[in-house]
Amino acid sequence: MGAELSKAVVDGILTGGVYALMAAGLTLIFGVMEIINIAQGIFVVLGAYLSYLLEVHLGIDPFLGLVITMPLMFGVGVLIEWGFVRPLEAQNRSALSILVTFAVAIVIEGILTQLFSADLKTLTAWYVDRSVHVLGFYLPYIYLLGFALAVVLLVALYLFLYRSRGGKSIRASVQNRVGAELVGININRVSALTFGIGAAVTAAGGMVFGATNSFNPNSGYDLISRLLVIIVLGGLGSIGGALVASVVALVIEDVTAVLWSPVWASTMFFAVLVVVLLVRPNGLFGRVAARAQ
Amino acid sequence: MVSPPAVPGVPGDPLDRPALRLARRAGLLVVVAIAIAFPFVFTNPATTSIAMFTLIYAGAATAWNMFSGFTGYMALGNAVFYGCGAYCFANITQHLHLSGGLGIFALVPLAGLFAGLVAVPVGWLALRTRRHTFVVVTIAIFFIFQLLAYNLHGLTNGSAGMSLPIPPWDAQTYNTYFYLAALVVAVIAVALSWAVRRSGFGLELLAIRDDEDRALGLGVKTSRVKLLTFVLTGVVTGMCGAIYAYYLGSIYPPFAFEAIFDVTVALMAFLGGLGSITGPVLGALILEPVQQYINLRFTSGGLALITFGVLFLIVIRFLPEGIVPSLAGILRRRLAARASAAETSPAAGPPRVGPPVGAGASGASR
């Protein structure tokens, strides 16, 4: 039992890292634009399909393929922001953006269904099915590689946000949108950039997701529901919060699967949010962290 | 989160004249008469089926609007109540071994009450949060309930679903009874929405939408008011769900707790006019037949999704505040532009899409 439990914790941490990457994008979008991008889930699925295409038709290794899929998804994000989110009027913008991004998600899901049908697909590579024996555990290579990827990208995101001018503009917009405009920051460009980043990270997350799960266009709903739970749990707008929340939620889910039953594990995932909100209605790192950043 | 449209109903509002009020009442009666007569005139089961779904969604959208439109809290988890109403109805009929027929419709309010009871803890929990967190919490709760429906085999029979008694009516008139039941629920929803809006209670809700902290400071018991409205929404939506389940004859978790339902009712309310009384009905009248048509026309799931999504986007892109408030605004400006003494009958007014001025203009006072 102890070994199973420890494995569950380790698995939780590893997958949590990948979810953290995708959730970071989502919470960043919220921080800058105050909108909830419901399409983030389907973006992940789209990223998975893109990696799948590269692997099946061009024989490109999924990790290497990221060099192509990430800029592609960045472009998709920028296009969607420009085409669907920006035209929304200021009034009711927050509420309408939810409906708009949901509509975009439906359209993308429809397109993917038409192109790929509802058959389950999964990515294959030498590291997907093999495990490495570490400290008494058998850890699938893909989990470790995926976690490493997530860490690398999150560090890159951190460096971008805190060491570059573009990043500084983004952080300024998060802190005070109007103030940022007043000091000359081009909010439209920042918004597009943020949305693009938010989509680009889903390319990476999608690749790992596609390698560790079988997926079809319908997988988006489960993903977005989890990502939403994570960003609220962590506190909307807080990337650090998203990190902690991902790991915590995933660990709890995996542990529940071992201790109680796999059937109830997913329910537990959502229940964690409910429990935390009882104590901290703004999430773990709610307002405080956003200002501290 | 949702900002208020223009405020009508102030003294001197051109739409509040006695002649217009009479016209509104008359128009309302006409609409209801047409609605009752509809299934007897258009007896094609396909038509009455679409009409019935339209009424169910009209009721659900009005209920959604009663909370989210008036308070500004976007709730995207109302399918919880829809599903709870459906499963409650299924459970009762199954445990009491009831057979299909007219009498069972009496259980629909009971299912609604059950959904309302569920709304109490759900609302209490969700309403502790504000704005965006609230939206996500309602979504999360929705998924919890969907998962519960899959896993609580004792109550829901899991993914095997539950079956409901099949009424012994013949194919021609089968839909008619369901249609009428749905009509009753829709009328209740609109009446409730109207009563809430007209009362001091409704003003408190609007105050919460405009500036909750100020309302709190002025003595509005915001928590209680929000929760009560949330429960009312649950009751009506639950009744809609019960009728839906009864009509289908069997209920499964993904149909009872359907993600698209949440967004559809919101879209209908937005289209018709968020915060108006008849707006959601109009939205349902427009969107639901289209949705049914798309589902029938496109058997391949992908095309249906694409069409529906694009439709969504078009609707959102081109609706300013929704049809009813926009038209009411146009009407108001036209009337104000004329000499106030002119006693013409602008009730015949500009050609309108949807219900006649009677029902529509009552939404003008929102």
Image (cartoon, coloured by chain):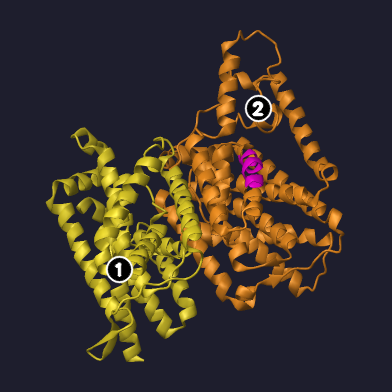
**Which residue is at 58% across, 33% downward?**
B323
Residue A275 on image: x %, y %: 41, 67
Q: Which residue is mark 1?
A: A18
Q: Is residue A286 magenta?
A: no
Q: Range of the magenta residues? A: B280-290
Q: In front here: A66 or A151?
A: A66
Q: Are marks 2 and 1 in contact (CB under 8 Å)?
A: no
Residue B116: image quadrant is bottom right
Question: Does residue A19 appear in the picture of this structure?
Answer: no
Q: Chain of mark 2?
A: B
Chain B tint as drawn: orange
Question: Does residue A210 appear in the picture of this structure?
Answer: yes
The residue type indicated by label 2 comes to Arg
Q: Chain of mark 1?
A: A
Q: Which chain is yellow?
A: A
**Which residue is at 13% across, 50% downward?**
A164
Which corner quadrant holds the C terminus of chain B?
top right
What crowding class fits label 1: few (fewer than 14 Cα within 10 Å), some (14-19), or many (20 or more)?
Answer: many
